[in-house]
Structures are given as structure tokens and as C-alpha cells.
Amino acid sequence: MVYKDDKLYLLLHTGRRGRSTGFIKIFDFSTQLPQETFHCGVTSNNNTSDSDSWRVWATKLVVTVTGHVLKVEKLVNPGQGGPLRLWSFRVYKHHDEPVASLGHEAMLFD
């Protein structure tokens, strides 16, 4: 959850083994009565037979130090089933537009 400029950005999800579903909602609090201004479904299917593939481990909403709200997917690659796991992440703006670089910015996680 992120609150910025009279807007509440909410990421709600339910997780089942191998599958995560949920949605992103944005509420505008700039008027007397808050209104939902955006609603979008989020689904990731982590079931795969390839043990070397990346899987979405978690999804979060974050805010950069300059105030941009981004969606971050934390990825895991379990490798060959041993104790070593590789971690990475993907960053999106406007729900599904990939961000290649943050430039000279930083992200703040809760």
C-alpha cells in the first residue's frame, strides 16, 4: 500500500500453491468522498516443469525517492533443486510498462 498526492495505491493478492492472483486499485482522496479511479487484475502462474525458469516470488508496490509509484516483481530461480537460489526483480510503471533503469533514483521498501 502506498499513499501519495491524495491517492491510495493498493495491491491486494491471494496466493495458492504455484499461482498468485489479485488486483491493483487506486483510490482518489482529493474530494470529500474517496473514489476508485483504477482497477486492474494481476495474475502470475508459477507452475512450470522447467526447473531453470524464473518464477514470481512476490509482488509489491514501491515509491521512489522522487515519488514515482512502481510495481516490483521479486523473481526466484531455484536452479537444480539445491540450496542455491538466484534472485532478481522486474520493475513496472503504469501497471505493465517495464522499467529498464531507475537512473539515479532509489526505491524505498517497507
Image: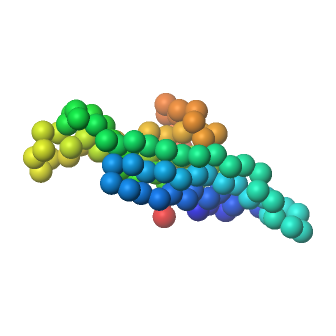
Where 22 sits versus 92, above or below? below
For the point 25% across and 41% down, the residue is: 77
Q: Is 11 or 87 nearer to us in this picture? A: 11
Is residue 25 visible from the viewing direction of this image? yes
- Please say if 97 is above or below 81: above
Q: Position of residue 65 (x, y in %)?
A: 58, 53
Q: Residue at x 48, y 64 (%)?
A: 110
Q: Determine the image quadrant of residue 2.
A: bottom right
Residue at horizontal 29%, vertical 44%? 76
Q: Residue at x 28, y 37 (%)?
A: 48
Q: How many callouts does the rendering have?
A: 0
Residue extending farthest bottom: 32
46 to 7, vertically: above or below? above
Q: Provide residue 84's location: percent of width, then percent of height.
A: 14, 47
Residue 97, picture quadrant = top right
* 70 lies left or right of 50: right
* Closer to the camera in the image, 66 or 1: 1
Q: Estimate the x, y position of residue 67 in percent, counting from the top left.
A: 65, 51
Figure quadrant of the N terminus? bottom right
Residue 89 visible in this rendered orientation of the protein: no
Q: Give coordinates of residue 41: x percent, y percent.
A: 59, 46
* Horizontal relation, residue 9 to residue 35: left or right: left
